[in-house]
Amino acid sequence: MKRLQKITAISLLCLLVPAAIATQFTAVQSSDPYEDVVENVKDAIIGRGLNISNVLPAGEMLNRTGHDLGYPDNVFSHAETIEFCSAMLSHQLVSINPNNMVLCPFTISIYQLSKDDKSVYVTYRTPDAGPETKAVIDKVTQLIKSIVAEAVE
């Protein structure tokens, strides 16, 4: 019986953890060419001594699969998400609560809409993992804001 109770408790915890993490989105607009903005974001990340762990070509995937899934119009002409890590901030987050691992890596998305080739958007999310994590989340937010500001200046 104790084993069944443990499994039930773990299952409930897995369902509740994502609900406890609220997210806000911020978008910054630029009139620079898309490729320049992407390179500026990468340079700003690397310039801070941070590691880019992955670049996700989200626009390519969405444009490639949209028609087959019943979405006839492409939302993006370009869209990428850049994942990166700060070992210091990640350690601070997981030291407070191991579940904060879900907040890593940090991401910045850059996209251009199919219907607007004059604007490029740089977006990021600000997670909320509870009051005990607020001070570190504020540091993460400041880091990402500074990267975005440098990329679109």
Image (cartoon, grey):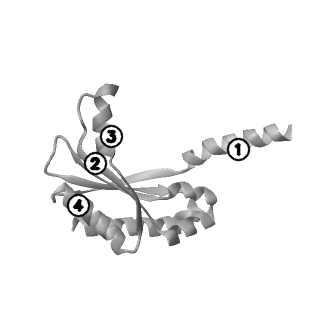
Closer to the N terminus: mark 3 or mark 4?
4
Residue at figure coordinates x 63%, y 44% from the top left:
14
Residue matched to label 1: 10
20 or 30, nearer to the observer = 30
**Which three-letter amino acid code belongs to the residue tagged 1?**
Ile
Residue matched to label 4: 37
Label 2: how many residues lie within 10 Å, few (<14), some (14-19) or many (20+)? Answer: many
Are the residues flagged by discs 1 and 3 in contact, CB closer than 8 Å? no
Are the residues flagged by discs 3 and 2 in contact, CB closer than 8 Å? no
Q: Which mark is residue 79?
A: 2
Are the residues flagged by discs 2 and 4 in contact, CB closer than 8 Å? no
Residue matched to label 3: 61
Res. 42 image quadrant:
bottom left
Closer to the N terminus: mark 1 or mark 3?
1
Which one is in front in this view, the residue at disc 3 or the one at disc 4? 3
Whole-angstrom CA distance, mark 3 to mark 2, is 9 Å
Label 1: how many residues lie within 10 Å, few (<14), some (14-19) or many (20+)? Answer: few
**Which three-letter amino acid code belongs to the residue tagged 4?**
Val
